[in-house]
Amino acid sequence: MYSCPICGAPVAFGVRFCDNCGTPLNWQTQQQSQPPPVHRQPQQQSSSWLVVSIALAAIVLLVGGGIFAFNTISQKTPPSTVPPTGSPPASDVIAPTITNVEATSVTETGAFITWTTDEPASSEVEYSQAAGHPALPVTKTALVVNHSITLSDLFPDTEYKYRVKSRDSSGNEAISDYYTFITAERYTYHDYYPIILSLSDDKGNVIKTSRDNHYVGPYGSSATNTSLKIGDKISWTIEAKDPKGRQLLYRWNSNSQRFNALVGYKWNTSSQLDYTITPDDLKTAGEILRIVGSIKSEKEYLRSPGNEDDDSAFLDYKLLP
């Protein structure tokens, strides 16, 4: 059964006009065995396929055009020269600069080594005694610019050579020249306080011991074979030392009241005294005249509380009328 292409009413094959709407019908007579009308319903289905095909072609053209444009722009645009964010900085190949190397607070058994660098770096001191001794390192890994290391367990009165090293965070190491220091002498009783080495006169008598200088003989072995009489002149001299180099003061005293009244117990910087024997010396001192020489440091570094001097020595003489 066929239908009118305009109103859709059913029509019989070979009818020239539609009975419903009067539309002329055009049949193809050369295919009358199965002659389809020119205006059959499947014509609308062909139009739909045409639209779909055109749409697909447009999509292909758009996608292809986009790819072509992207490739063209990529070829014409030079690569970026800006480094990506987070790129590592240029390598550091410069070692720290070491300055102000110094050994301070040097004692009998230790020393304090200090130096500075122009950038944060580690700290190391290599030190040893004279040539032939192995170098001993003392190291701190903290990165600082003001460096300090304490050396300990050293030998007294010994020369040490040392150098310092510093390494920055990139591994660049700086090494200083060699320097030296000498540790202090070990403290002994005679290495701090002043002592009298000798007390002598111009008659040939000398005593090489004193109250606190016990190197030669016991203190008190000072009797002389010299006899003094009224009118005799005599001169005494004290030889002393201060291991710290301090200024020394001297004084004299005796068992003679006249002697003490004239020159006794007066501190001064002279290590020599001249005196003439008088009858008053014989009267107040008796047969034995004792002359005592004493010393002290100008800064009064006394050996023990209550002492008025640091050391003393004496000589005894027989007085004759």
Image (cartoon, grey):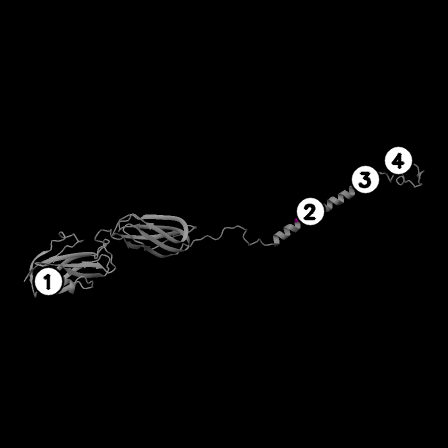
Residue 275 in picture, x, y percent from top left: 12, 65
Marks 1 and 4, how far apart at CA: 178 Å
Q: Which residue is mark 4?
A: 2
Query: SS of the residue at dot 1?
Result: helix
Instruction: Tell which circle, 3 or 1, labels the residue nearer the N-terminal end.
Output: 3
Q: Where are the magenta residues, as a range?
A: 60-67
Residue 83 placement, left or right of 281: right
Mark yes or no: residue 277 visible: no
Q: Earlier in the sequence, mark 4 or mark 2?
A: 4
User: Which mark sits nearer the N-terminus, 1 or 4?
Assistant: 4
In the picture of the structure, the residue carrying the numbered disc 2 is 63
Mark 3, residue position = 45
Dot 3 or dot 2: first in sequence order is: 3
- Residue 295 locus on image (x, y percent): 19, 59
Contact? badges 4 and 3 (CB < 8 Å): no
Residue type, mark 2 in image: Val
Disc number for residue 281: 1
Give the CA distance from mark 4 to mark 3.
17 Å
